[in-house]
Image: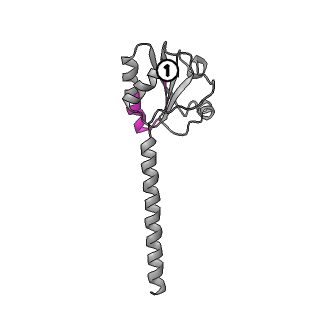
Amino acid sequence: MNAASAMETTGLVVCVAVLAVAGVFGLLRRRGDGRLKVRDEGERRLGPAELGVELGERATLVQFSSAFCQPCRATRRILADVAGMVEGVAHVELDAEERLELVRELGILRTPTVLVLDARGRVVRRAAGQPRTADVIAALGEAV
């Protein structure tokens, strides 16, 4: 085997390895995307001072969005539909760019990010990415 052939083989092996790692990363990210997870926020509560609106009587769905985020639009529809179905639940959408201090404080890394708050404003679930309607309803069961 000459040197040029060895370099081509090495390049091919590196390329295949990079594609395999990227594929595994993509599958893992897709698997967890939009899942409403329990995240220990301690006794951290959000209220009208932070959100700019009153909390829902039973629960509040808080959505952090950005202007050019396509999944944010679909998430807005999902959360608005759920809030319309469940009495006492409010949906609040916040522009992440306008609320950078709160975004940093809460450790929000991407949009959409959804927080499910109980009636007292305590974060009971959190999802990064577009959640499924069934998952939002199930998370509300814990908040209510």
**In this rendering, does residue 65 appear at all?**
no
Could you tell me which residue is drawn at 59 percent across and 22 percent down?
46
Residue 1 against residue 50 in the figure, above or below: below
Q: How many marks?
A: 1
Q: Nearer the viewer, residue 4 or 43?
A: 43
Residue type at tag 1: Ala
Residue 140 against residue 101 in the figure, above or below: above
**In this rendering, does residue 71 appear at all?**
yes
On the image, the x and y values in percent for residue 23 come to 42, 55
Quick one: label 1, few (<14), some, or many (20+) residues within 10 Å? many
Is residue 25 shown left or right of residue 97? left
On the image, the x and y values in percent for residue 118 come to 52, 19
Find the magenta span and give its range. Answer: 60-76
Q: Nearer the viewer, residue 47 or 18?
A: 18
On the image, the x and y values in percent for residue 87 come to 40, 13
- Quadrant location of residue 84? top left
Is residue 44 shown left or right of residue 86? right
Is-magenta flag for residue 89? no
Q: How is the image coloured?
A: one colour
Considering the image in quadrants, where does the N terminus appear? bottom left
Say which element carries label 1. helix
Residue at image mark 1: 143
Residue furthest bottom as drawn? 2
Residue 112 against residue 43 in the figure, above or below: below
Could you tell me which residue is drawn at 56 percent across and 36 percent down?
108
Could you tell me which residue is drawn at 58 percent across and 18 percent down?
47
On the image, the x and y values in percent for residue 135 come to 41, 30
Is residue 108 shown left or right of residue 36? right
